[in-house]
Image (cartoon, rainbow, N blue to C red):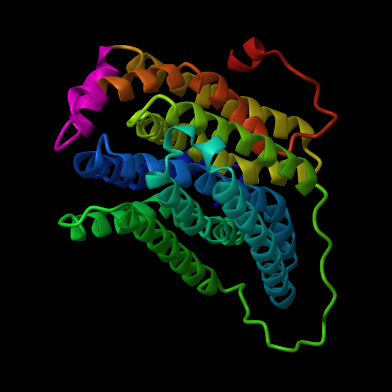
């Protein structure tokens, strides 16, 4: 892919957006099936209470790994040292596994000890045990998704975007299969099994794509070169933002669980509805433009880097506005009804999800505006510009 060809960049955005859209259609099908079989039940609420922090931490660690390690991989690919590149990959995977396992253990302990605080609506003796077990099981998603993030950085340094965009399809597809196969005996345990197996399938696929790259060379056990590459300094502020974000996720779930059965799943389903336009718009643009930012900065072309940032921000904001209008009108209610109202999921739950989605949609355009800047490696010498100037 030619990073500096504007037409090629737009084609890449379209390709990534198409693959992402197809993958997230699987996610919508997953949520529709979950609503049809588990809608309005305590089991689905418990599942989402435990899934939200585990998924948030896993995906954020994956993003942090991607942002921190992609420049390193790009640099070694440019040098052409296959052995050193593969050794760096193994070092970063080992570091991510150790760090994410520690995070998973802390999450499990937090979920077990602070369940009445995290999920006050499910602190009764009959449901408390299920919430704690769910936290322990779904904490496995943290290291799995974290390692996928390292593989994503390695692959996208080669211009290979498909594995990451297909991640939702693997996770959702396996969960759909598990739910349908266990339909005669509905239980939160099947939801936990399906989630972990889906993430493991995505990890196996991504690893197979890494091994297929010509620049990858297997590392021999007991290699003489034991010098480890220093970690990039950009990790510290990224980790701080991760901690702050995790607090908001748990706070959201705590409030939602206090509204009664169905509150947590309404928040989760509404958030998942908005994930599709978020991924199609901001995800596709940021995925393609981030290597462009990095390449411009590496060459010292600060003006071109900021110009690319301006184009990406204009693109995502103008594309996000129609989505906000959709969810804040009756069209959003109709779309929610068409997707979810079947089986045990009644119209009352449809209205709850629709109203929640409308509230969340109001923040989509500002969030979309911030995402490309978050993904960019904006140089300090670039002067600040007003939002109106960027949009115009």
Q: Residue at x 72, y 69 (%)?
A: 91
Relative to 226, is 259 on the left or the right?
Answer: left
Farthest residue in the front direction? 125
Majority SS type along the magenta span? helix
Across and down, in percent, residue 204 comes to 45, 69
Query: Which of the image's four quarters has the C terminus?
Result: top right
| Residue 348 magenta-highlighted | yes
Q: Is residue 2 visible?
A: no
Q: Is residue 197 visible?
A: yes
Look at the picture and state if 205 lies above or below 110: below
Query: Looking at the image, which residue is at 63% across and 35% down?
Result: 247
Residue at 51% from the left image edge and 26% from the top image edge: 316
Q: Position of residue 334 (x, y in %)?
A: 21, 20
Q: Residue at x 82, y 66 (%)?
A: 229
Q: Which residues are magenta?
A: 330-349
Is 177 part of what is drawn in magenta? no
Closer-to-camera residue (48/42):
42
| Residue 127, quarter of picture | top left
With respect to residue 173, does 217 lie above or below?
below
Looking at this view, is 332 or 382 the one in front?
Answer: 332
Total residue callouts: 0
Residue in the foreground of this view, choosing between 18 and 168? 168
Residue 168's spot in the image, x, y percent? 40, 50
């Amino acid at each position: 892919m030619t990073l500096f060809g504007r037409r090629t960049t737009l084609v890449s955005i379209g390709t990534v957006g198409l693959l992402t859209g197809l993958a997230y259609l699987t996610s919508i099908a997953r949520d529709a099936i979950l609503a049809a079989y588990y809608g309005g039940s305590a089991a689905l609420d418990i599942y989402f209470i435990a899934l939200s922090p585990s998924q948030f931490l896993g995906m954020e660690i994956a993003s942090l790994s991607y942002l921190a390690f992609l420049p390193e991989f790009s640099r070694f690919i440019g040098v052409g040292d296959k052995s050193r590149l593969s050794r760096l990959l193994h070092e970063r995977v080992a570091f991510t596994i150790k760090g994410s396992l520690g995070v998973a253990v802390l999450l499990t302990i937090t979920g077990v000890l602070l369940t009445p605080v995290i999920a006050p609506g499910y602190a009764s003796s009959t449901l408390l045990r299920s919430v704690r077990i769910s936290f322990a099981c779904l904490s496995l998603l943290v290291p799995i998704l974290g390692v996928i993030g390292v593989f994503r950085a390695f692959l996208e340094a080669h211009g290979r975007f498909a594995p990451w965009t297909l991640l939702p399809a693997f996770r959702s597809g396996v969960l759909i299969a598990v739910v349908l196969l266990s339909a005669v005996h509905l239980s939160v345990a099947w939801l936990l099994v399906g989630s972990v197996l889906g993430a493991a399938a995505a990890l196996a696929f991504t690893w197979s794509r890494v091994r297929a790259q010509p620049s990858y060379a297997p590392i021999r056990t007991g290699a003489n070169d034991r010098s480890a590459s220093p970690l990039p300094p950009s990790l510290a502020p990224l980790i701080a933002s991760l901690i702050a974000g995790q607090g908001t996720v748990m706070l959201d779930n705590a409030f939602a669980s206090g509204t009664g059965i169905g509150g947590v799943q309404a928040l989760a389903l509404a958030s998942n509805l908005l994930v599709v336009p978020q991924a199609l718009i901001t995800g596709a643009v940021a995925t393609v433009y981030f290597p462009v930012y990095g390449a411009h900065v590496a060459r010292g072309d600060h003006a071109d880097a900021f110009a690319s940032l301006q184009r990406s921000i204009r693109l995502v904001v103008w594309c996000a506005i129609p989505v906000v209008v959709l969810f804040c009108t009756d069209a959003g209610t109709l779309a929610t009804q068409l997707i979810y109202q079947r089986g045990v999921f009644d119209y009352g739950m449809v209205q709850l999800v629709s109203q929640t989605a409308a509230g969340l949609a109001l923040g989509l355009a500002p969030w979309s505006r911030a995402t490309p800047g978050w993904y960019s490696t904006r140089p300090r010498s670039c002067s600040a510009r007003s939002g109106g100037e960027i949009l115009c």
